[in-house]
Amino acid sequence: MSLYALIQWSDLFTSIINLSTVCSPRKEIEQYKEGEYIEAKYQGKQYRAIISEICELRIYDPTSPSFTP
């Protein structure tokens, strides 16, 4: 399972990251919570951020028989 987070960096910009890429605190991805402060890398440097929202990535295949728009 891949969980992604909408995070707000300390400079107030936002990004979407895979929670497996969090530098600190390191824990199981299911244990991260919205509102939690983390350290994550952006362009090779580590920055502080807050998790705004967590979601699971789902890819829909329109050719799949179970696909409904």
Image (cartoon, grey):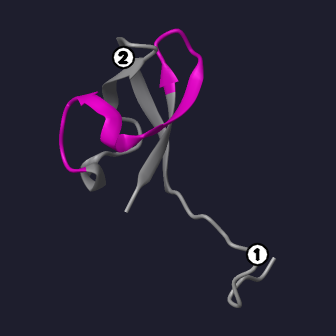
Residue 30 appears left or right of 69: left
Place of residue 35 in the rendered image (x, y in percent of width and height, measured from the top left): 40, 36
The kind of residue on which mark 1 rests is Pro
Q: Which mark is residue 52?
A: none
Q: Nearer the viewer, mark 2 or mark 1?
A: 1
Q: Give the quadrant of residue 61.
A: bottom right
Pick out the residue farthest to the front.
63
Percent position of residue 19, x then y: 37, 42
- Numbered range of the magenta stretch: 8-28
Q: Residue at x 41, y 43 (%)?
A: 34
- Residue 46 vs 67, above or below: the answer is above
Name the quarter where the C terminus is drawn.
Answer: bottom right
Q: Position of residue 1 (x, y in %)?
A: 37, 63
Q: Residues within 10 Å of mark 2 (few under 14, many from 20)?
A: some
Q: Which circle marks residue 48 in the picture?
A: 2
Q: Which residue is mark 1?
A: 62
Q: Nearer the viewer, residue 35 or 18?
A: 18
Locate residue 14: give its quadrant. Answer: top right
Disc 1 packing (10 Å; few <14; some 14–19; many ≥20): few
**Which residue is rendered at x = 38% and y = 13% of the image?**
44
Residue 15 point in image, percent of width and height: 56, 29
Q: Secondary structure at mark 1?
A: loop
Q: Earlier in the sequence, mark 2 or mark 1?
A: 2
| Mark 2, secondary structure of its residue | strand
Q: Amino acid at mark 2?
A: Arg
